[in-house]
Image (cartoon, rainbow, N blue to C red):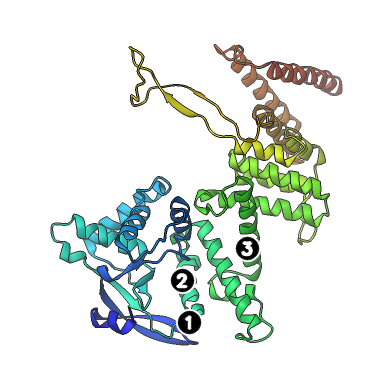
């Protein structure tokens, strides 16, 4: 479809939207476009991770968003009705209810062939309302600007990035899709620089930062580096391209990238950096630490020597506690994350036949991949606690009394835990040995402290 054809069947309104087209500002008319002539264009926008997931779920199939079957599938994803997008359900319902009550208030942006590059969720809401409403005619038109035929790829990227990634509108983009959009811009501008299509002396990062309100060149470098680390993580767990599983973990990767960059700039041994990455991937995957706790790992390293400003003193003892609980080989750490999760088995009925009664399962059989995992997660969790305490001890603002009160609370919690029914019986031999070692060390520390304060 050509834009002229789309314009013919659409109703022009009195509203105007300003966009940057071919190096100049243009006030483009807003049209009421029949929703039947539009398709979801989520390949590179705020829902890019969803399209990647849809392709991975349908290997070898030609997913044409112009075909009604795929329109319906994408609509379900945007509505939060797919198992991987349920977190979006409430936002979709709110938007749908708002459009139902007040009509579509914010115009979208439509490509000349009918692809929607801004307003996909609004289009999904209109499609759903047109099927559910007693008066479907109310919802059969989408308000949007129809871009001219001479809109360049740079114009299109800038429109998408400017609309969705400016500081005031960032809520519309998930963190990982924001990173994907930045990567797309860097690639596009690198190609344009190579072809001499932009003024000399400008870098791709500068051009991307200029296009996205509120971003600096340093921000763009950080975002590109964070996405590279996310790519390494997805490869590590053998789920390349599954960006939709990152979610809020993007903030964890922001801290993880700082940690890895600091280690690299300190010229640490490559073997140490490889294990450090594997440990960070395991910590993020198992949600052992949040992004605030990960900052302590950065401080334990002593910070990034290439960054300006005051740095905390390195804490190698605490760092050793953080890493020591993990196997030496990154492959062994990876194997733990690749271990297949157990699947529940149905409870057999009386009489010998299996039953798939809802909510009733028997103990699952655990299967492994590439051998049994070698990460002792209880040991790792204990190491995290020791790391935390050592970092707290390095905090010069804490008083001796605060340390003593904290140690007392920890011992009381241990006592309470061991006295609760069933907890001692559940201890493994390794647990018992670790607790005994800790108690012996505590007794030694108590004797020393008592001598000092007498």
Assess whether mark 3 and mark 2 are in contact (beta carbons under 8 angstroms). Answer: no
Q: Residues within 10 Å of mark 2 (few under 14, many from 20)?
A: many
Front residue of 119 and 367 = 367
The correct choice, above or below, for 148 with respect to 233 in the image is: below
Earlier sequence position, callout 1 versus callout 3: 1
Who's the residue at 34% across and 48% down the image? 81
Who's the residue at 21% across and 67% down the image? 140
Between the residue at mark 1 and the residue at mark 3, the CA separation in whole angstroms equals: 24 Å
Assess whether mark 2 and mark 1 are in contact (beta carbons under 8 angstroms). Answer: no
**Residue 313 visible in this rendered orientation of the protein:** no
Q: Closer to us: mark 1 or mark 2?
A: 1
Earlier sequence position, callout 2 versus callout 3: 2
Front residue of 59 and 158 = 59
Q: Which mark is residue 224?
A: 3
Q: Is residue 104 left or right of residue 57?
A: left
Residue 236 coordinates in the image, percent (x, y) = 64, 47
**Residue 226 visible in this rendered orientation of the protein:** yes
Between the residue at mark 2 and the residue at mark 3, the CA separation in whole angstroms equals: 18 Å
Tag 1, which secondary structure?
Answer: loop
Tag 3, which secondary structure?
Answer: helix
Residue 138 coordinates in the image, percent (x, y) = 18, 65
The correct choice, above or below, for 63 with respect to 185 in the image is: above
Tag 2, which secondary structure?
Answer: helix
- According to the image, label 1 marks what residue? 152
Between the residue at mark 1 and the residue at mark 2, the CA separation in whole angstroms equals: 12 Å
- Quarter in which the C terminus is drawn: top right
* Outermost residue to the left: 134
Residue 111 coordinates in the image, percent (x, y) = 38, 76
Who's the residue at 53% across and 71% down the image? 212
- According to the image, label 2 marks what residue? 160
């Amino acid at each position: 479809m050509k834009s002229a054809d789309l314009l013919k069947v659409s109703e022009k309104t009195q509203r105007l939207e300003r966009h940057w087209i071919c190096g100049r500002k243009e006030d483009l008319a807003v049209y009421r476009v029949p929703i039947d002539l539009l398709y979801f264009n989520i390949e590179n926008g705020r829902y890019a991770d969803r399209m990647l997931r849809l392709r991975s779920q349908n290997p070898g199939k030609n997913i044409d968003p112009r075909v009604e079957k795929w329109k319906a599938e994408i609509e379900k994803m945007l509505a939060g009705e797919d198992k991987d997008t349920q977190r979006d359900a409430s936002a979709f319902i709110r938007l749908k209810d708002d459009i139902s009550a007040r009509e579509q208030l914010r115009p979208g942006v439509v490509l000349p062939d009918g692809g929607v590059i801004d307003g996909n969720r609004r289009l999904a809401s209109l499609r759903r309302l047109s099927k559910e409403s007693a008066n479907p005619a109310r919802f059969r038109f989408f308000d949007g600007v129809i871009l001219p035929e001479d809109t360049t790829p740079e114009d299109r990227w800038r429109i998408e990035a400017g609309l969705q990634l400016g500081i005031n509108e960032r809520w519309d983009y998930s963190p990982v899709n924001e990173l994907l959009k930045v990567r797309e811009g860097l690639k596009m501008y690198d190609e344009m620089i190579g072809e001499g299509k932009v003024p000399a002396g400008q870098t791709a990062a500068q051009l991307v930062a200029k296009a996205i309100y509120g971003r600096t060149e340093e921000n763009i470098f950080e975002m590109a580096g964070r996405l590279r680390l996310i790519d390494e993580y997805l490869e590590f767990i053998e789920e390349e391209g599954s960006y939709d599983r990152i979610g809020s973990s993007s903030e964890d990767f922001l801290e993880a990238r700082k940690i890895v960059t600091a280690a690299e700039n300190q010229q640490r041994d490559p073997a140490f950096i490889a294990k450090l990455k594997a440990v960070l991937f395991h910590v993020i995957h198992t949600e052992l630490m949040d992004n605030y706790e990960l900052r302590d790992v950065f401080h334990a390293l002593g910070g990034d020597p290439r960054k300006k400003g005051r740095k905390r003193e390195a804490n190698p003892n605490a760092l050793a506690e953080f890493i020591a609980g993990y196997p030496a080989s990154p492959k062994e750490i990876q194997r733990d994350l690749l271990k297949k999760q157990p699947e529940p088995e149905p409870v057999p009925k009386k009489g010998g036949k299996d039953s798939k009664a809802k909510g009733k399962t028997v103990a699952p059989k655990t299967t492994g991949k590439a051998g049994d995992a070698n990460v002792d997660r209880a040991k790792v969790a204990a190491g995290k606690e020791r790391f935390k305490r050592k970092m707290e001890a390095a905090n010069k603002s804490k008083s001796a009394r605060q340390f003593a009160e904290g140690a007392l609370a920890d011992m009381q919690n241990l006592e309470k835990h061991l006295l609760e029914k069933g907890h001692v019986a559940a201890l493994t031999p390794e647990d018992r040995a670790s607790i005994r070692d800790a108690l012996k060390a505590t007794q030694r520390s108590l004797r020393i402290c008592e001598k000092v304060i007498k």
